[in-house]
Protein backbone atom coordinates (compact mmCIF):
# COMPACT_ATOMS: atom_id res chain seq x y z
CA UNK A 1 0.00 0.00 0.00
CA UNK A 2 1.27 3.37 -0.80
CA UNK A 3 1.30 5.71 2.10
CA UNK A 4 1.57 8.94 0.23
CA UNK A 5 -1.61 8.46 -1.71
CA UNK A 6 -3.38 7.20 1.31
CA UNK A 7 -2.39 10.36 3.01
CA UNK A 8 -3.27 12.61 0.15
CA UNK A 9 -6.76 11.25 -0.07
CA UNK A 10 -7.42 10.38 3.54
CA UNK A 11 -6.16 13.65 4.87
CA UNK A 12 -8.57 15.46 2.68
CA UNK A 13 -11.30 12.93 3.07
CA UNK A 14 -13.45 13.54 6.06
CA UNK A 15 -14.55 10.80 8.43
CA UNK A 16 -17.63 10.29 6.35
CA UNK A 17 -15.47 8.70 3.70
CA UNK A 18 -13.75 6.47 6.16
CA UNK A 19 -15.79 3.40 5.26
CA UNK A 20 -15.27 3.80 1.56
CA UNK A 21 -11.65 4.31 2.29
CA UNK A 22 -11.47 1.02 4.14
CA UNK A 23 -12.97 -0.73 1.13
CA UNK A 24 -10.14 0.54 -1.00
CA UNK A 25 -7.97 -2.23 0.32
CA UNK A 26 -10.17 -4.82 -1.33
CA UNK A 27 -11.04 -2.90 -4.46
CA UNK A 28 -8.79 -2.07 -7.37
CA UNK A 29 -7.27 0.87 -5.54
CA UNK A 30 -8.01 4.30 -4.20
CA UNK A 31 -10.22 6.41 -6.43
CA UNK A 32 -7.57 9.09 -6.61
CA UNK A 33 -5.07 6.59 -8.00
CA UNK A 34 -7.53 5.24 -10.55
CA UNK A 35 -8.62 8.70 -11.71
CA UNK A 36 -5.02 9.83 -11.94
CA UNK A 37 -4.03 6.72 -13.86
CA UNK A 38 -6.94 7.06 -16.28
CA UNK A 39 -6.06 10.68 -16.93
CA UNK A 40 -2.43 9.71 -17.39
CA UNK A 41 -3.51 7.27 -20.12
CA UNK A 42 -5.57 10.03 -21.75
CA UNK A 43 -2.60 12.39 -21.70
CA UNK A 44 -0.38 9.75 -23.29
CA UNK A 45 -2.94 9.30 -26.07
CA UNK A 46 -2.96 13.09 -26.48
CA UNK A 47 0.81 12.96 -26.87
CA UNK A 48 0.40 10.25 -29.50
CA UNK A 49 -1.88 12.67 -31.38
CA UNK A 50 0.76 15.38 -31.05
CA UNK A 51 3.33 12.96 -32.45
CA UNK A 52 1.33 12.80 -35.69
CA UNK A 53 1.58 16.59 -35.98
CA UNK A 54 5.28 16.42 -35.20
CA UNK A 55 5.75 13.78 -37.89
CA UNK A 56 3.87 15.90 -40.43
CA UNK A 57 5.98 18.92 -39.56
CA UNK A 58 9.23 16.93 -39.78
CA UNK A 59 8.27 15.76 -43.27
CA UNK A 60 7.06 19.16 -44.49
CA UNK A 61 9.57 21.52 -42.89
CA UNK A 62 11.47 21.90 -46.17
CA UNK A 63 8.36 22.24 -48.35
CA UNK A 64 8.35 26.02 -48.36
CA UNK A 65 7.12 26.33 -51.95
CA UNK A 66 9.51 29.24 -52.45
CA UNK A 67 8.01 31.00 -49.45
CA UNK A 68 9.74 32.00 -46.22
CA UNK A 69 11.68 29.41 -44.26
CA UNK A 70 11.49 28.91 -40.53
CA UNK A 71 14.78 30.68 -39.89
CA UNK A 72 13.48 33.79 -41.70
CA UNK A 73 10.22 33.94 -39.75
CA UNK A 74 10.72 32.69 -36.24
CA UNK A 75 12.07 34.90 -33.51
CA UNK A 76 14.31 33.06 -31.06
CA UNK A 77 13.84 35.83 -28.53
CA UNK A 78 10.06 35.46 -28.59
CA UNK A 79 10.20 31.69 -28.19
CA UNK A 80 12.66 32.12 -25.31
CA UNK A 81 10.11 34.30 -23.49
CA UNK A 82 7.37 31.78 -24.24
CA UNK A 83 9.51 28.94 -22.92
CA UNK A 84 10.34 30.86 -19.74
CA UNK A 85 6.63 31.53 -19.13
CA UNK A 86 5.66 27.91 -19.58
CA UNK A 87 8.54 26.51 -17.51
CA UNK A 88 7.81 28.88 -14.62
CA UNK A 89 4.12 28.04 -14.85
CA UNK A 90 5.03 24.35 -14.58
CA UNK A 91 6.80 25.16 -11.32
CA UNK A 92 3.91 27.22 -9.94
CA UNK A 93 1.59 24.43 -11.06
CA UNK A 94 3.55 22.08 -8.77
CA UNK A 95 3.03 24.59 -5.94
CA UNK A 96 -0.75 24.25 -6.44
CA UNK A 97 -0.52 20.61 -5.50
CA UNK A 98 1.78 21.27 -2.54
CA UNK A 99 -0.61 23.95 -1.31
CA UNK A 100 -3.57 21.59 -1.71
CA UNK A 101 -1.81 18.83 0.20
CA UNK A 102 -1.14 21.32 3.00
CA UNK A 103 -4.80 22.55 2.84
CA UNK A 104 -3.69 26.14 2.44
CA UNK A 105 -6.39 27.98 0.48
CA UNK A 106 -4.58 31.28 -0.02
CA UNK A 107 -1.39 29.55 -1.12
CA UNK A 108 -3.22 27.23 -3.52
CA UNK A 109 -5.22 30.06 -5.05
CA UNK A 110 -2.10 32.22 -5.38
CA UNK A 111 -0.29 29.39 -7.16
CA UNK A 112 -3.32 28.95 -9.45
CA UNK A 113 -3.34 32.67 -10.28
CA UNK A 114 0.40 32.66 -10.95
CA UNK A 115 0.05 29.63 -13.24
CA UNK A 116 -2.87 31.28 -15.03
CA UNK A 117 -1.07 34.58 -15.57
CA UNK A 118 2.05 32.85 -16.90
CA UNK A 119 -0.10 30.71 -19.20
CA UNK A 120 -1.94 33.81 -20.39
CA UNK A 121 1.33 35.61 -21.10
CA UNK A 122 2.48 32.61 -23.10
CA UNK A 123 -0.75 32.66 -25.09
CA UNK A 124 -0.53 36.40 -25.78
CA UNK A 125 3.04 36.03 -27.04
CA UNK A 126 1.99 33.18 -29.29
CA UNK A 127 -1.05 34.97 -30.71
CA UNK A 128 1.11 38.04 -31.39
CA UNK A 129 3.63 35.90 -33.23
CA UNK A 130 0.89 34.26 -35.31
CA UNK A 131 -0.80 37.52 -36.29
CA UNK A 132 2.55 39.02 -37.24
CA UNK A 133 3.37 36.07 -39.47
CA UNK A 134 -0.05 36.12 -41.11
CA UNK A 135 0.19 39.87 -41.75
CA UNK A 136 3.52 39.26 -43.51
CA UNK A 137 1.76 36.89 -45.90
CA UNK A 138 3.19 33.86 -44.12
CA UNK A 139 -0.12 32.36 -43.07
CA UNK A 140 -0.97 28.67 -43.05
CA UNK A 141 -2.04 28.79 -46.71
CA UNK A 142 1.38 29.98 -47.91
CA UNK A 143 3.16 26.62 -47.93
CA UNK A 144 2.97 23.08 -46.61
CA UNK A 145 5.69 23.99 -44.10
CA UNK A 146 3.58 26.82 -42.70
CA UNK A 147 0.44 24.67 -42.65
CA UNK A 148 2.22 22.09 -40.53
CA UNK A 149 3.76 24.80 -38.36
CA UNK A 150 0.41 26.44 -37.58
CA UNK A 151 -1.26 23.05 -37.07
CA UNK A 152 1.37 21.85 -34.57
CA UNK A 153 2.02 25.06 -32.63
CA UNK A 154 -1.64 26.07 -32.87
CA UNK A 155 -2.72 22.69 -31.49
CA UNK A 156 -0.46 23.23 -28.49
CA UNK A 157 -1.79 26.76 -28.10
CA UNK A 158 -5.36 25.41 -28.19
CA UNK A 159 -4.44 23.01 -25.39
CA UNK A 160 -3.05 25.91 -23.34
CA UNK A 161 -6.28 27.88 -23.93
CA UNK A 162 -8.38 24.93 -22.74
CA UNK A 163 -6.02 24.57 -19.77
CA UNK A 164 -6.60 28.22 -18.83
CA UNK A 165 -10.38 27.75 -18.93
CA UNK A 166 -9.98 24.67 -16.75
CA UNK A 167 -7.75 26.62 -14.38
CA UNK A 168 -10.34 29.36 -13.98
CA UNK A 169 -13.00 26.74 -13.29
CA UNK A 170 -10.77 25.07 -10.69
CA UNK A 171 -10.20 28.38 -8.90
CA UNK A 172 -13.95 28.93 -8.63
CA UNK A 173 -14.65 25.35 -7.58
CA UNK A 174 -11.92 25.40 -4.98
CA UNK A 175 -13.17 28.69 -3.64
CA UNK A 176 -16.76 27.51 -3.35
CA UNK A 177 -16.35 23.87 -2.42
CA UNK A 178 -13.05 23.86 -0.55
CA UNK A 179 -10.61 20.94 -0.41
CA UNK A 180 -13.09 18.20 -1.17
CA UNK A 181 -11.96 14.83 -2.49
CA UNK A 182 -13.39 15.39 -5.95
CA UNK A 183 -11.86 18.87 -6.17
CA UNK A 184 -8.49 17.43 -5.22
CA UNK A 185 -8.78 14.77 -7.90
CA UNK A 186 -9.51 17.47 -10.46
CA UNK A 187 -6.57 19.51 -9.23
CA UNK A 188 -4.35 16.47 -9.68
CA UNK A 189 -5.65 15.94 -13.23
CA UNK A 190 -5.15 19.61 -14.05
CA UNK A 191 -1.64 19.38 -12.68
CA UNK A 192 -0.88 16.40 -14.93
CA UNK A 193 -2.40 18.19 -17.92
CA UNK A 194 -0.34 21.33 -17.40
CA UNK A 195 2.93 19.43 -16.94
CA UNK A 196 2.15 17.46 -20.10
CA UNK A 197 1.73 20.75 -21.99
CA UNK A 198 5.17 21.84 -20.88
CA UNK A 199 6.66 18.51 -21.96
CA UNK A 200 5.08 18.92 -25.40
CA UNK A 201 6.36 22.50 -25.49
CA UNK A 202 9.91 21.25 -24.85
CA UNK A 203 9.59 19.18 -28.01
CA UNK A 204 7.98 22.11 -29.90
CA UNK A 205 10.60 24.72 -29.07
CA UNK A 206 13.41 22.26 -29.71
CA UNK A 207 12.23 20.67 -32.96
CA UNK A 208 10.21 23.50 -34.52
CA UNK A 209 12.00 26.65 -33.39
CA UNK A 210 15.60 25.77 -32.52
CA UNK A 211 16.24 22.99 -35.05
CA UNK A 212 14.22 25.01 -37.59
CA UNK A 213 16.47 27.99 -36.95
CA UNK A 214 19.65 25.93 -37.16
CA UNK A 215 18.77 24.52 -40.58
CA UNK B 1 0.46 -3.02 6.32
CA UNK B 2 -0.27 -6.73 6.37
CA UNK B 3 -2.84 -6.10 3.67
CA UNK B 4 -0.19 -4.91 1.31
CA UNK B 5 -0.27 -8.04 -0.84
CA UNK B 6 -4.02 -7.76 -1.31
CA UNK B 7 -3.84 -4.42 -3.00
CA UNK B 8 -2.54 -4.39 -6.54
CA UNK B 9 0.82 -2.86 -6.00
CA UNK B 10 0.98 -1.56 -9.53
CA UNK B 11 -1.78 0.94 -8.81
CA UNK B 12 0.15 2.30 -5.89
CA UNK B 13 0.73 5.90 -6.86
CA UNK B 14 -1.24 8.32 -8.91
CA UNK B 15 0.95 9.95 -11.52
CA UNK B 16 1.92 13.43 -10.51
CA UNK B 17 1.92 12.70 -6.81
CA UNK B 18 5.00 12.62 -4.71
CA UNK B 19 5.20 9.28 -2.92
CA UNK B 20 7.60 10.37 -0.21
CA UNK B 21 5.15 10.84 2.56
CA UNK B 22 7.50 12.16 5.17
CA UNK B 23 8.31 15.25 3.18
CA UNK B 24 7.20 18.57 4.47
CA UNK B 25 5.69 21.08 2.11
CA UNK B 26 9.03 22.84 2.02
CA UNK B 27 10.78 19.66 0.89
CA UNK B 28 8.17 19.12 -1.82
CA UNK B 29 8.76 22.64 -3.06
CA UNK B 30 12.46 21.92 -3.09
CA UNK B 31 11.84 18.98 -5.42
CA UNK B 32 9.90 21.21 -7.81
CA UNK B 33 12.59 23.87 -7.53
CA UNK B 34 15.35 21.41 -8.43
CA UNK B 35 13.27 20.42 -11.45
CA UNK B 36 12.85 24.09 -12.39
CA UNK B 37 16.58 24.81 -12.10
CA UNK B 38 17.58 21.72 -14.09
CA UNK B 39 15.03 22.50 -16.81
CA UNK B 40 16.18 26.11 -16.95
CA UNK B 41 19.81 25.02 -17.33
CA UNK B 42 18.92 22.60 -20.12
CA UNK B 43 16.75 25.22 -21.85
CA UNK B 44 19.43 27.90 -21.66
CA UNK B 45 21.98 25.41 -23.00
CA UNK B 46 19.71 24.61 -25.96
CA UNK B 47 19.19 28.30 -26.83
CA UNK B 48 22.91 28.97 -26.35
CA UNK B 49 23.93 26.19 -28.75
CA UNK B 50 21.70 27.61 -31.45
CA UNK B 51 22.83 31.21 -30.99
CA UNK B 52 26.56 30.63 -30.60
CA UNK B 53 28.73 29.34 -33.37
CA UNK B 54 30.79 27.26 -30.96
CA UNK B 55 29.26 23.97 -32.06
CA UNK B 56 29.78 22.26 -35.40
CA UNK B 57 26.63 23.11 -37.41
CA UNK B 58 25.37 19.67 -38.43
CA UNK B 59 25.65 18.40 -34.86
CA UNK B 60 23.32 21.07 -33.46
CA UNK B 61 20.07 19.14 -34.10
CA UNK B 62 21.55 16.10 -32.34
CA UNK B 63 22.70 18.18 -29.38
CA UNK B 64 19.29 19.87 -29.19
CA UNK B 65 17.49 16.52 -29.28
CA UNK B 66 19.66 15.19 -26.44
CA UNK B 67 18.93 18.29 -24.36
CA UNK B 68 15.19 17.99 -25.07
CA UNK B 69 15.10 14.32 -24.06
CA UNK B 70 17.02 15.19 -20.91
CA UNK B 71 14.60 17.99 -20.09
CA UNK B 72 11.58 15.75 -20.66
CA UNK B 73 13.22 13.28 -18.28
CA UNK B 74 13.64 16.06 -15.70
CA UNK B 75 9.97 17.02 -16.06
CA UNK B 76 8.86 13.42 -15.63
CA UNK B 77 11.04 12.89 -12.57
CA UNK B 78 10.71 16.19 -10.72
CA UNK B 79 7.31 17.53 -11.83
CA UNK B 80 5.35 14.34 -12.46
CA UNK B 81 7.29 12.37 -9.81
CA UNK B 82 7.52 9.37 -12.05
CA UNK B 83 9.91 6.81 -10.62
CA UNK B 84 11.00 3.31 -11.48
CA UNK B 85 9.82 2.05 -8.11
CA UNK B 86 7.43 -0.92 -7.86
CA UNK B 87 4.44 1.28 -6.97
CA UNK B 88 4.97 3.22 -10.19
CA UNK B 89 5.07 0.26 -12.56
CA UNK B 90 1.70 0.97 -14.15
CA UNK B 91 2.48 4.62 -14.80
CA UNK B 92 5.89 3.79 -16.23
CA UNK B 93 4.50 0.97 -18.38
CA UNK B 94 1.85 3.29 -19.81
CA UNK B 95 4.54 5.88 -20.49
CA UNK B 96 6.73 3.24 -22.15
CA UNK B 97 3.85 2.18 -24.39
CA UNK B 98 3.10 5.79 -25.26
CA UNK B 99 6.74 6.36 -26.12
CA UNK B 100 6.72 3.26 -28.33
CA UNK B 101 3.68 4.51 -30.29
CA UNK B 102 5.20 7.99 -30.63
CA UNK B 103 8.45 6.47 -31.90
CA UNK B 104 6.57 4.30 -34.39
CA UNK B 105 4.47 7.20 -35.69
CA UNK B 106 7.35 9.67 -36.08
CA UNK B 107 10.05 7.20 -37.09
CA UNK B 108 7.78 5.34 -39.48
CA UNK B 109 6.57 8.56 -41.11
CA UNK B 110 10.08 9.90 -41.62
CA UNK B 111 11.33 6.56 -42.95
CA UNK B 112 8.50 6.11 -45.44
CA UNK B 113 8.42 9.74 -46.59
CA UNK B 114 12.20 9.80 -47.03
CA UNK B 115 12.01 6.75 -49.27
CA UNK B 116 9.18 8.23 -51.32
CA UNK B 117 11.13 11.46 -51.66
CA UNK B 118 14.14 9.55 -52.95
CA UNK B 119 12.05 7.72 -55.53
CA UNK B 120 10.42 10.81 -57.01
CA UNK B 121 12.99 12.62 -59.14
CA UNK B 122 10.95 15.73 -59.89
CA UNK B 123 10.00 16.15 -56.26
CA UNK B 124 13.62 15.73 -55.26
CA UNK B 125 14.39 18.47 -57.76
CA UNK B 126 11.94 20.80 -56.10
CA UNK B 127 12.29 19.84 -52.46
CA UNK B 128 14.62 22.49 -51.12
CA UNK B 129 17.07 20.38 -49.22
CA UNK B 130 18.74 23.56 -48.14
CA UNK B 131 22.30 22.74 -49.21
CA UNK B 132 22.30 24.73 -52.40
CA UNK B 133 23.54 28.23 -51.67
CA UNK B 134 22.21 29.77 -54.89
CA UNK B 135 18.81 28.43 -54.04
CA UNK B 136 19.11 29.86 -50.55
CA UNK B 137 19.77 33.27 -51.99
CA UNK B 138 16.83 33.06 -54.31
CA UNK B 139 14.40 31.88 -51.63
CA UNK B 140 15.56 34.18 -48.88
CA UNK B 141 14.75 37.26 -50.92
CA UNK B 142 11.55 35.82 -52.22
CA UNK B 143 8.97 36.19 -49.51
CA UNK B 144 6.59 37.95 -51.85
CA UNK B 145 8.14 37.08 -55.21
CA UNK B 146 6.45 34.18 -56.95
CA UNK B 147 8.72 31.38 -58.04
CA UNK B 148 5.99 29.35 -59.63
CA UNK B 149 3.37 30.36 -62.16
CA UNK B 150 0.12 28.61 -62.94
CA UNK B 151 -1.08 29.12 -66.49
CA UNK B 152 -4.81 28.90 -67.17
CA UNK B 153 -6.72 28.85 -70.42
CA UNK B 154 -7.55 32.28 -71.87
CA UNK B 155 -9.98 30.92 -74.48
CA UNK B 156 -12.42 28.03 -74.55
CA UNK B 157 -11.73 25.20 -76.90
CA UNK B 158 -10.05 21.88 -77.47
CA UNK B 159 -6.35 21.22 -77.00
CA UNK B 160 -4.99 20.67 -80.50
CA UNK B 161 -1.35 19.98 -79.68
CA UNK B 162 1.07 19.97 -76.76
CA UNK B 163 4.76 20.70 -77.05
CA UNK B 164 5.89 20.92 -73.39
CA UNK B 165 6.09 18.16 -70.82
CA UNK B 166 6.89 17.88 -67.14
CA UNK B 167 10.55 18.50 -66.35
CA UNK B 168 11.22 20.29 -69.66
CA UNK B 169 13.19 23.52 -69.75
CA UNK B 170 11.31 26.33 -71.52
CA UNK B 171 12.15 29.86 -72.60
CA UNK B 172 9.85 32.85 -72.20
CA UNK B 173 7.14 32.95 -74.85
CA UNK B 174 7.70 29.39 -75.98
CA UNK B 175 4.48 27.77 -77.22
CA UNK B 176 3.58 24.91 -74.92
CA UNK B 177 0.14 24.05 -76.28
CA UNK B 178 -2.28 25.17 -78.96
CA UNK B 179 -5.98 25.38 -78.25
CA UNK B 180 -8.35 24.90 -81.14
CA UNK B 181 -11.34 27.25 -81.12
CA UNK B 182 -13.80 26.23 -83.89
CA UNK B 183 -15.76 29.53 -83.88
CA UNK B 184 -12.58 31.56 -84.16
CA UNK B 185 -11.29 29.48 -87.06
CA UNK B 186 -14.55 29.78 -88.98
CA UNK B 187 -14.70 33.50 -88.11
CA UNK B 188 -11.27 33.95 -89.64
CA UNK B 189 -12.20 32.04 -92.81
CA UNK B 190 -15.33 34.17 -93.14
CA UNK B 191 -13.44 37.42 -92.57
CA UNK B 192 -10.81 36.45 -95.11
CA UNK B 193 -13.50 35.64 -97.68
CA UNK B 194 -15.23 38.98 -97.06
CA UNK B 195 -11.93 40.75 -97.48
CA UNK B 196 -11.25 39.06 -100.79
CA UNK B 197 -14.75 39.99 -102.02
CA UNK B 198 -14.26 43.59 -100.90
CA UNK B 199 -10.91 43.81 -102.66
CA UNK B 200 -12.48 42.43 -105.86
CA UNK B 201 -15.23 45.06 -105.70
CA UNK B 202 -12.66 47.75 -105.05
CA UNK B 203 -10.74 46.62 -108.12
CA UNK B 204 -13.92 46.72 -110.22
CA UNK B 205 -14.66 50.25 -109.07
CA UNK B 206 -11.13 51.34 -109.89
CA UNK B 207 -11.45 49.88 -113.39
CA UNK B 208 -14.78 51.65 -113.81
CA UNK B 209 -13.23 54.88 -112.63
CA UNK B 210 -10.32 54.71 -115.03
CA UNK B 211 -12.75 53.85 -117.89
CA UNK B 212 -14.88 56.86 -117.01
CA UNK B 213 -11.81 59.10 -116.91
CA UNK B 214 -10.71 57.77 -120.35
CA UNK B 215 -14.20 58.48 -121.69
CA UNK B 216 -14.04 62.00 -120.32
CA UNK B 217 -10.70 62.57 -121.99
CA UNK B 218 -12.04 61.28 -125.33
CA UNK B 219 -15.04 63.55 -125.09
CA UNK B 220 -12.80 66.53 -124.61
CA UNK B 221 -14.73 69.74 -124.99
CA UNK B 222 -17.12 68.35 -127.63
CA UNK B 223 -20.28 68.38 -125.65
CA UNK B 224 -20.59 70.20 -122.41
CA UNK B 225 -23.78 68.23 -121.57
CA UNK B 226 -22.12 64.83 -122.08
CA UNK B 227 -19.07 66.15 -120.36
CA UNK B 228 -21.18 67.11 -117.43
CA UNK B 229 -22.80 63.64 -117.30
CA UNK B 230 -19.38 61.94 -117.38
CA UNK B 231 -18.15 64.10 -114.53
CA UNK B 232 -21.23 63.22 -112.49
CA UNK B 233 -20.58 59.53 -113.15
CA UNK B 234 -16.96 59.87 -112.03
CA UNK B 235 -18.01 61.58 -108.82
CA UNK B 236 -20.43 58.78 -107.97
CA UNK B 237 -17.77 56.15 -108.77
CA UNK B 238 -15.34 57.97 -106.54
CA UNK B 239 -17.88 58.02 -103.74
CA UNK B 240 -18.46 54.27 -104.06
CA UNK B 241 -14.71 53.71 -104.14
CA UNK B 242 -14.29 55.61 -100.90
CA UNK B 243 -17.04 53.51 -99.27
CA UNK B 244 -15.43 50.26 -100.41
CA UNK B 245 -12.06 51.41 -99.06
CA UNK B 246 -13.62 52.14 -95.66
CA UNK B 247 -15.39 48.79 -95.49
CA UNK B 248 -12.14 47.06 -96.44
CA UNK B 249 -10.38 48.80 -93.55
CA UNK B 250 -13.12 47.63 -91.18
CA UNK B 251 -12.76 44.10 -92.46
CA UNK B 252 -9.00 44.22 -91.95
CA UNK B 253 -9.50 45.38 -88.37
CA UNK B 254 -11.90 42.55 -87.54
CA UNK B 255 -9.53 40.05 -89.15
CA UNK B 256 -6.71 41.35 -86.98
CA UNK B 257 -8.89 41.02 -83.88
CA UNK B 258 -9.73 37.44 -84.83
CA UNK B 259 -6.07 36.68 -85.41
CA UNK B 260 -5.03 38.09 -82.04
CA UNK B 261 -7.74 36.01 -80.40
CA UNK B 262 -6.33 32.98 -82.15
CA UNK B 263 -2.93 33.90 -80.72
CA UNK B 264 -4.48 33.84 -77.25
CA UNK B 265 -5.22 30.22 -77.95
CA UNK B 266 -1.49 29.55 -77.77
CA UNK B 267 -0.38 28.55 -74.28
CA UNK B 268 2.96 30.28 -73.74
CA UNK B 269 5.68 29.82 -71.13
CA UNK B 270 5.62 32.93 -68.86
CA UNK B 271 9.38 32.92 -68.12
CA UNK B 272 12.57 30.95 -68.60
CA UNK B 273 12.10 27.97 -66.34
CA UNK B 274 10.97 24.44 -65.88
CA UNK B 275 7.62 22.77 -66.51
CA UNK B 276 6.57 21.56 -63.08
CA UNK B 277 3.26 20.02 -64.01
CA UNK B 278 1.06 19.47 -67.03
CA UNK B 279 -2.66 19.10 -66.36
CA UNK B 280 -3.93 18.71 -69.94
CA UNK B 281 -3.57 16.23 -72.74
CA UNK B 282 -4.31 16.45 -76.43
CA UNK B 283 -8.06 16.62 -77.14
CA UNK B 284 -9.01 17.98 -73.69
CA UNK B 285 -11.71 20.63 -73.56
CA UNK B 286 -10.52 23.76 -71.72
CA UNK B 287 -12.48 26.77 -70.51
CA UNK B 288 -11.16 30.04 -68.98
CA UNK B 289 -14.15 30.22 -66.62
CA UNK B 290 -13.17 26.99 -64.88
CA UNK B 291 -9.80 28.52 -63.79
CA UNK B 292 -8.24 25.13 -64.15
CA UNK B 293 -4.45 25.06 -64.35
CA UNK B 294 -3.07 23.93 -67.69
CA UNK B 295 0.61 24.11 -66.79
CA UNK B 296 2.67 25.08 -63.77
CA UNK B 297 6.06 26.63 -64.39
CA UNK B 298 8.85 27.10 -61.85
CA UNK B 299 12.20 28.79 -61.90
CA UNK B 300 14.97 26.21 -62.17
CA UNK B 301 16.40 25.68 -58.69
CA UNK B 302 19.92 24.64 -59.57
CA UNK B 303 21.51 27.25 -61.70
Image (tube, coloured by chain):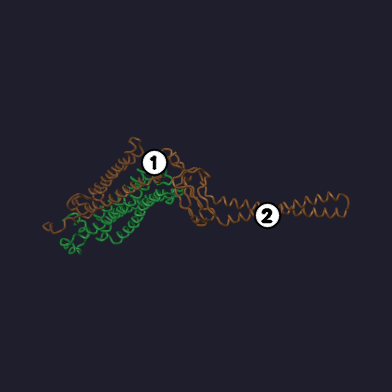
The quadrant in which the C terminus of chain A is found is top left
Residue in view at x 58 percent, y 52 percent = B261
Q: For the residues labelled 2 and 1, say whether their Cβ atoms are less than 8 Å apart.
A: no
Give the x, y percent position of residue A168: 34, 57
Q: Of circles 2 and 1, which is in front?
A: 2
Give me the chain that's green. A
Residue pictured at 57% horizontal, 57% vertical: B183
Left or right of B37 on screen, residue A4: left
Q: Can the viewer see residue B297?
A: yes
Q: Chain of mark 2?
A: B
At mark 1, the secondary structure is loop
Query: Where does residue B78 sit, x and y in percent of width and height?
Result: 25, 48
Residue A84 visible in the displayed image: no
Q: x, y percentage for residue B180?
A: 54, 54
**Residue A194 picture location, percent across and down:** 30, 53
User: Mark 1 = which residue?
Assistant: B130
- The secondary structure type at the circle numbered 2 is helix
Whole-angstrom CA distance, mark 2 to mark 1, is 66 Å
Q: Which quadrant is the N terminus of chain A positioned in?
A: bottom left
* Marker disc for residue B197: 2
Amino acid sequence: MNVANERFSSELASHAHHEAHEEDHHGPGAKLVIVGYGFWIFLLSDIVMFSAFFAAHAVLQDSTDGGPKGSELLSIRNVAYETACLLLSSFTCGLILVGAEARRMAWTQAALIATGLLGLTFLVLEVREFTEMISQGAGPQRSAFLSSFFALVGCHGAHVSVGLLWLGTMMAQLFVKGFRDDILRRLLCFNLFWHMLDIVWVAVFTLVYLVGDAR
Amino acid sequence: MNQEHEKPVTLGVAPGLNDLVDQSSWQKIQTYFIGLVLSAVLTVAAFYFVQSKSIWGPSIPVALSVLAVAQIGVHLAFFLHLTTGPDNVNNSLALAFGTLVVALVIGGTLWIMYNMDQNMPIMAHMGSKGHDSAQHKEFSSAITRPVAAVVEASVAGRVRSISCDVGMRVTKGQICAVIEVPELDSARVKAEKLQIDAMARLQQEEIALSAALDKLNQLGAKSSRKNHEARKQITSIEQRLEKEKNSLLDLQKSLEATNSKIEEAYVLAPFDGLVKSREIKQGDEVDPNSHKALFTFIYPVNQ
